[in-house]
Amino acid sequence: MIRRPTLPTWQRGVWVLLADQVLMNTGFFMLFPLLTVHLTRDLGFDATGVGLVLAGRNLVQQGTAPLGGSLSDRIGY
């Protein structure tokens, strides 16, 4: 007998948070190609410049997360 897959039995709030995270990630990663086109076509950046801008943005967001997390652990959010 083949078992049909079922969804986990999480509370409604968990499903809302999961859907919110999926929508935020989808919207965020849809922005990257648009930003790349704007930087190259409208502002005249070359591929290296676009790469540096996107890498700097990623470094600021991901790189400061441990600092912010440790500060919020010490002093509270």
Image (tube, rainbow, N blue to C red):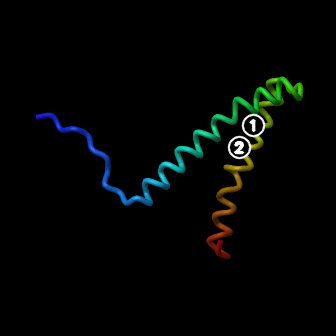
Seen from this angle, which residue lies furthest bottom? 75
Residue found 71% across the figure and 43% down from its top = 58
Residue found 18% across the figure and 38% down from its top = 3
Q: Secondary structure at mark 1?
A: helix
Mark drawn on residue 21? none
On screen, residue 66 above or below 35: below
- Where is residue 65? Give x, y as percent: 66, 56
Q: Secondary structure at mark 2?
A: helix
- Where is residue 35? Give x, y as percent: 76, 33
Seen from this angle, which residue lies furthest left? 1
Seen from this angle, which residue lies furthest right? 44
On screen, residue 72 above or below 49: below
Q: CA distance from mark 2 to mark 1?
A: 6 Å
Q: Residues within 10 Å of mark 2 (few under 14, many from 20)?
A: few
Q: Residues within 10 Å of mark 1 (few under 14, many from 20)?
A: some
Q: Is residue 19 left or right of residue 61?
A: left
Q: Disc 2 vs disc 1: Cβ atoms closer than 8 Å?
A: yes
The kind of residue tagged 1 is Leu
Residue found 73% across the figure and 31% down from its top = 34
- Where is residue 48? Give x, y as percent: 81, 27
Hey, which quadrant is residue 41 in on the image? top right
Q: Is residue 58 left or right of residue 1?
A: right
Read off the residue under disc 2.
58
Residue found 53% across the figure and 50% down from its top = 20
Which of 49 and 38 lies nearest the eye of the viewer?
38
Mark drawn on residue 54? 1
Question: Which image quadrant: the C terminus?
Answer: bottom right
Query: Exactly how many numbered labels are in the figure?
Result: 2
